[in-house]
Image (tube, rainbow, N blue to C red):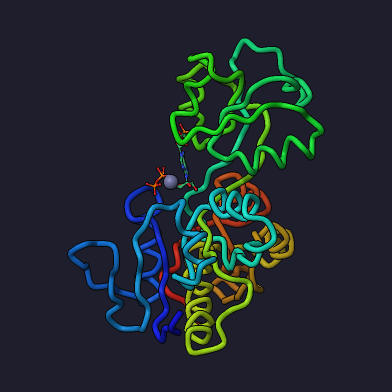
Amino acid sequence: MKPRDRLRIAMQKSGRLTEPALDLLNRCGLTFRQSRDKLFCFGEGEPVDLLLVRDDDIPGLIAQGVCDLGIVGRNVLNEFRGVNGDADAALTEWRPLGFGRCRLSIAVPQEMDYSKPGDLNGLRIATSYPGLVNDWLRAEGVNAAVITLAGSVEIAPKLGTADAICDLVQSGGTLVANQLRETDVLLQSEAVLAGPTALPTDERGDMIELLLKRLDGVIQVRESRLLLLQTSRTSLDAVTRLLPGGPQPTLLPVAGQPDQLMLQALCAGEVSWRQLEEIKKAGAREMFVLPVEKMLA
Ligand code: PRT
Ligand code: ZN
């Protein structure tokens, strides 16, 4: 294949991952011209183009070298890696992206007696992830038949074509609506940036490194919160000990109140109401949690 001088990223054409993936790339400074066939989008600023495809095709396109990177669910990536064995194990997860979160779980009819994986012995499990389910069954030492279905897995037990299922679960609403009960989680999934383990050695490799750096910045900002609060000097230690992870807080004097300090801390992740209440109990007041828009260290 002729070497390309532009980077090509595969992402889902239309589905759950489309909008957040495009939003993430935009935040990394990548914008694309809409093409008429909507399969290929030419990158406007940077030499990075998009290929819009079905999510299931993404790992294969990277493995074949048609694309350099892909944004795809870990569930799809791992199923591909499992089924395609060593040759394609050269695909890796470059970054978890924090959206499209779900889990791949076993679920059984609500009335079924189930307490451990061994209870699936001799039963039929319907799934769209035969590779991952077979791996799990093997690891658990369970002998069950795996029935591969492309979709509507959740109705298989009611139709009598399977005894249990293994499918993606997010809210759990689909399982409840089908009188199923989640029993075992095989995989915690989210969208990931997938690519070959060995990066190209030409300009595309440099471009990937640049993109990874931008991604790290974007992800860090997205997950960062700025916590502002006031505390007395005597409570400072107790308050500081409760601060969610992140760099050292900055302390500022409060005009006219020598005993008081203003504290500013960058937190890596959400700050929950419960954490705020605990910090308050330790002596803090006037607390604010602010989102961070941009960050340049
Ligand atoms: O056309 P194409 O093949 O590209 O799309 P698709 O229909 O295969 O994919 P799509 O858009 O449904 O999902 C794309 C990716 O989103 C998946 O591979 C997962 O990584 C991720 N994702 C996150 C989910 C869900 N959450 C999810 N809830 N994918 C599917 N579901 C389905 C699940 O299969 C079940 O039917 O939603 C139902 C369960 O949802 P709850 O909320 O009722 O539990
Ligand atoms: Zn799909």
On screen, residue 43 versus residue 177, left or right, reads left
On screen, residue 242 versus residue 105, left or right, reads right
Residues 148 and 68: in front is 148
Specify the farthest residue to the left.
36
Residues 11 and 257: in front is 11
Eyeballing the image, is 113 above or below 212? above
Specify the farthest residue to the right.
141
Which residue appears at 58% of the width and 53% of the height? 80
On the image, the x and y values in percent for residue 237 come to 74, 64
On screen, residue 186 versus residue 224, left or right, reads right
Eyeballing the image, is 286 above or below 3? above
On the image, the x and y values in percent for residue 31 come to 30, 74
On the image, the x and y values in percent for residue 90 come to 64, 67
Specify the farthest residue to the front.
1
Residues 188 and 232: in front is 188
Residue 84, quarter of the rendered image? bottom right
Residues 223 and 211: in front is 211
Eyeballing the image, is 241 above or below 203? above
Specify the farthest residue to the top.
111
Which residue appears at 44% of the width and 70% of the height? 66
Please say whether residue 231 is visible from this viewpoint. Answer: yes
Please say whether residue 262 is visible from this viewpoint. Answer: no
